[in-house]
Image (cartoon, rainbow, N blue to C red):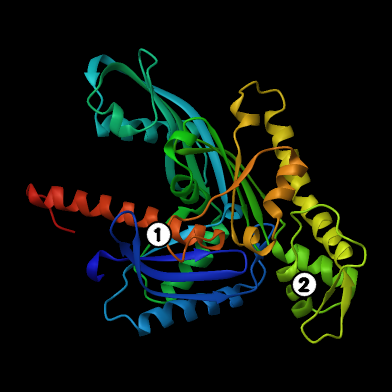
Amino acid sequence: MRNESVAILDIRSNEVFFSLGAKGVNGTFVISNSHAEGYEGFSNGVFLDEKSLRKAVHNAVNDVRKNYGGSIHTVYVGVPSAFVSVITKGHTVSFSSKRKVSSADIEYLYESGWNDLAVSKRCIRRSSMYFSLGDNRKYFSAKELRGTATTSLKGGLCYYCISETFYQTVSAILGELGIAEIKFIPSTLAQSVYLISEQKREGYAFLLDVGFMTSSISVIYGNGIVHEETFDFGVGTILVALMDELGVDLATAEEILSASNISGGAVPGNMVWTNDLGNLQFPVSLLNDIIKSSLDTLCEQVDGFFEARYKDKKTSGLSVNPISLTGEGISAIKGSKEHISKRISRLTEVVVPDLPYFDKPAFSSRIALLNMAIADGEKRSWIKRFFYGFGGEKK
């Protein structure tokens, strides 16, 4: 593609977003073309209507193509956590004598670790929580340990496996559009690396991504995800609760949620919400109670996740470090940050892309995906230039 742009397809639980983007100056991005399209979504790790997904992807890709003069050969697809399983492994390789660690050694560590797992799943990416050498020095970046002499190399490794249904479905849809190459990227991994600083990730960091139909909690250490769980909860859950409790339609429920804010305490009993037409009224206290009660479902699930995984762990960071909140649900449910923090007794902070216009939780997954796709594209281009420059075959 022209101007070293990359194409990304961000698949959320009720919307797909296709765009072409390139690196800008000072950590910014230049998005030349983009299109968002709604669809029926997914639940319990299953697309509710594959025809709806196919139509949405076709519309999004074709709309961008219409305004773009180049060819799109490769697409980076963001895979939601509902379709990703994370496998972690501590693995060590030993050398016959002391030697300097090379890129080939790190590659062998990953490959032999994966082979030891002997699983039949399709691995789309791998990363590390940390590396350590024979003298137990710990490193969080492969760059730091290259060239360091050691007799052994150890890593806390993470392998990200994709649901075969997701892989086959999305591959077939993009194949119909003539896309020659598809690169899958775990969405929550991309968000973790982009939204949370390296310093915070060198302790335990937490990311709660609240979407429209699903949400996920991820525990991050270094450049890897330690544990992750997806819940069938999102903005849609609260809209359904409002519709059921109040007997209103979807448009009215959306109007109520848009006007609500649950960050404060009790509200006066005589305070009422009135719709735009002026023909419907509900006590604000009732509306807030419905929203809070629905959001409590997610809080209980997050609490249960930590209780099940980390009840007996003594690491202070597991209870002290804040939970980073992002996703379209954080914007749609005003006051959710304060309510979640109070309900689960943990510090929370909202994380967003540090970019003008895109500095909203709803844009986190698409910008994080673009960031990782550009980094991957630069790495691949460098490898090609390296081998071609030294007489290798150009591909």
Q: Position of residue 182 (x, y in %)?
A: 39, 62
Amino acid at dot 1: Leu
Query: What residue do we see at 69% from left, 57% from top?
Result: 44
Query: What residue do we see at 71% from left, 70% from top?
Result: 258
Per the model, the C-alpha gap separating discs 2 and 1 is 33 Å
Q: Is residue 30 positioned above or below 233 on the image?
A: below
Q: Position of residue 231 (x, y in %)?
A: 70, 52
The answer to whether residue 231 shows anywhere in this view is no
Q: Which residue is mark 2?
A: 256
Q: Position of residue 213 (x, y in %)?
A: 68, 62
The N terminus, quarter of image? bottom left
Q: Secondary structure at mark 2?
A: helix
Front residue of 26/233: it is 26
Query: What residue do we see at 70% from left, 63% from top?
Result: 235
4 with respect to 331 (left or right)? left
Front residue of 368/125: it is 368
Looking at the image, do the residues carrying marks 2 and 1 touch, with CB atoms under 8 Å apart?
no
Disc nearer the start of the sequence (2/1): 2
Res. 39 mark: none
Query: What residue do we see at 74% from left, 37% from top?
Result: 345
Front residue of 204/10: it is 204
Q: Which residue is mark 1?
A: 370
